[in-house]
Image (cartoon, helix red, strand yellow):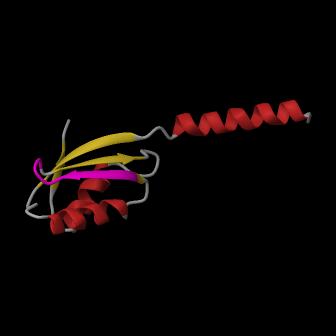
Amino acid sequence: MSMLARFGLAMFLSMSYAFASASQIAVMDLQNIQCYGCMLTVKKALQNVPGVEDTKLDLDQKTATVKFDPAKTNTETLVKATKNAGFPATVRK
């Protein structure tokens, strides 16, 4: 296989992977959140879910904004993680 063909194949595969794993964002309303310690607990619970790429929490709004790879996890798993940490959540539609 020529160098150009190998390069083309490598580019195709890397682009295919990038499109297949486009991140999604979920905004979750959190219950029982009262302090920064609560927020830290939720953040750690979410970050331990495989596929979670980033989490941003807002104590005033009692929300978690989670960027995740839908090929590795889903919103049901995120909700389960917060619930297991003691902070039930619902995903905004």
Residue stretch in magenta: 53-61
- Residue 60: x %, y % from top left: 10, 50
- Numbered disc total: 0
Magenta region includes residue 56: yes
Residue at x 23%, y 65% (from the top left corner): 40
Which of the two residues, 39 or 83, is positioned nearer the viewer here?
Answer: 39
In the image: residue 59, left or right of residue 17: left
Magenta region includes residue 88: no
- Residue 43: x %, y % from top left: 28, 61
**Where 38 sits versus 6, above or below?**
below
* Quadrant of image for the C terminus: top left
In the image: residue 52, left or right of residue 63: right
- Residue 20: x %, y % from top left: 53, 37
Q: Is residue 68 visible?
A: yes
**Where 62 sits versus 86, above or below?**
above
Tell me where residue 37 sits by quadrant. bottom left
Tell me where residue 8 sits by quadrant. top right
**Where 15 sits versus 67, above or below?**
above
Magenta portion: prevailing SS class: strand
Q: Is residue 86 visible?
A: no
Residue at x 42%, y 44% (from the top left corner): 70
